[in-house]
């Protein structure tokens, strides 16, 4: 009897050990399959990258990273983002590579990733989402391009890829808001969260049939202004003129600078100039500075004109605020309001 019980115990234990081994083998097999799939996607991405097909290569690296996250794949994805002009995504990926390299004790890779992230800073675009206290309600959520903006980051400038940035605002018992802002490379944009309108069930009772219901848009917001589109066109025209004048001044500056060397006033080999040559070089530099200022002003006016034109009223109230702004590394145009 005891021998039989011992045999049964041995068999039960053996089955348990075999189950553990089978479970471990299955998990190991899944990891191996994920790693193999990730490696295959990475190789496909590298092949496309080497052929210059960066738009097709980036999704391959993204899929590879989901299958088997590796620091090398993340670095290649950062490089691919940089190639297609997604500078904020590349900046974030390089910073993640630097952090992982620091944890792994790889100072060489950490230095390269940090330097590449630093080099991208002048190209970054920024969006600041501002939530006025008067517009804040319980449960309010702000999403930028489908991702929730943390409360701690409201009011802070966050790097984003240039282009169209979608903004969605929701709150319980309020009508949701959806809009977008266009962000140009290297510019800083501010967006002010609008006040959300209460839902019909939470709104004030409707007026009695004896008096016709008021026109909400006219009563609260006033008649839509008819000046926005003409003013927008004027600003766009002024911006185009500014860009043209800035470009002409830039060409003039280059011509003056080249003339200082071609005319014998400066020596290209020794970088030395006589009095006439130095005067021509100084004049070229002054003209180049004016060109930069005029060109920047033209770009700002053109952008403001586009925004004013595109946000002209079309049946629902809109509010837009435009002002110059500065940020680390340059200046831009601040845009806020409900689009």
Image: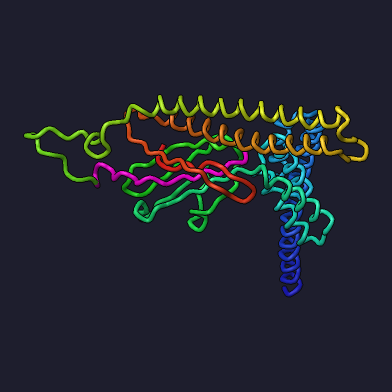
Residue 43, position as x, y percentages in the image: 80, 37
Residue 269, position as x, y percentages in the image: 93, 37
> Could one spot residue 29 in this view of the protein?
no
- Examine the structure image and report whether residue 201 is included in the region drawn in magenta: yes
In-front residue for pair 99/184: 184
> Could one spot residue 94 in this view of the protein?
yes
- Quadrant position of the C terminus in the picture: top left
Q: Vertically, is 202 above or below 162?
A: below
The residue under the point 88% across, 40% down is 271
The residue under the point 87% across, 35% down is 266
- The residue most toward the left is 210
Q: In the rendered image, which quarter is residue 296 located in?
A: top right
- The residue most toward the right is 269
Instruction: Indicate left or right for 106 with 172 as reference.
Output: right
In-front residue for pair 14/94: 94
The residue under the point 30% across, 44% down is 197
Residue 170, position as x, y percentages in the image: 40, 46
- Quadrant position of the N terminus in the picture: bottom right
Q: Which residues are magenta?
A: 185-202
- Examine the structure image and report whether residue 195 is included in the region drawn in magenta: yes
The residue under the point 28% across, 43% down is 199
In-front residue for pair 135/19: 135
Q: Vertically, is 230 above or below 174?
A: above
Q: In the rendered image, which quarter is residue 313 located in?
A: top left
């Amino acid at each position: 009897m005891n021998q039989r019980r011992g045999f049964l115990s041995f068999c039960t234990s053996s089955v348990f050990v075999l189950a553990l081994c089978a479970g471990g083998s299955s998990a190991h097999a899944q990891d191996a399959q994920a790693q193999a799939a990730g490696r295959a996607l990475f190789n496909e991405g590298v092949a496309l990258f080497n052929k210059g097909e960066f738009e097709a290569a980036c999704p391959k690296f993204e899929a590879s990273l989901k299958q088997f996250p590796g620091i090398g794949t993340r670095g290649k994805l950062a490089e691919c983002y940089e190639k297609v002009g997604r500078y904020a995504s590349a900046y974030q990926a390089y910073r993640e590579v630097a952090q992982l390299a620091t944890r792994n004790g790889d100072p060489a890779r950490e230095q390269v990733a940090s330097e590449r992230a630093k080099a991208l800073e002048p190209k970054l675009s920024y969006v600041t989402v501002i939530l006025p206290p008067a517009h804040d309600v319980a449960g309010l959520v702000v999403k930028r391009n489908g991702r929730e903006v943390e409360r701690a980051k409201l009011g802070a400038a966050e790097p984003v890829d240039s282009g169209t940035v979608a903004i969605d605002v929701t709150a319980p018992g309020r009508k949701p808001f959806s809009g977008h802002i266009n962000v140009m490379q290297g510019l800083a944009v501010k967006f002010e969260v609008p006040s959300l309108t209460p839902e019909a069930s939470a709104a004030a009772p409707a007026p009695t049939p004896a008096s016709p219901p008021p026109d909400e848009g006219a009563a609260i917001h006033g008649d839509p202004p008819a000046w926005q589109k003409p003013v927008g066109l004027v600003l766009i025209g002024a911006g185009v003129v500014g860009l043209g004048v800035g470009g002409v001044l830039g060409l003039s500056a280059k011509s003056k600078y080249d003339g200082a060397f071609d005319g014998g006033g400066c020596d290209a080999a020794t970088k030395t100039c006589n009095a006439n040559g130095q005067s021509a070089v100084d004049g070229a530099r002054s003209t180049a500075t004016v060109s930069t200022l005029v060109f920047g002003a033209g770009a700002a006016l053109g952008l403001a004109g586009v925004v004013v034109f595109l946000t002209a009223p079309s049946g629902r109230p809109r509010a837009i605020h435009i002002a110059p702004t500065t940020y680390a590394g340059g200046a831009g145009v601040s845009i806020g309001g409900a689009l």
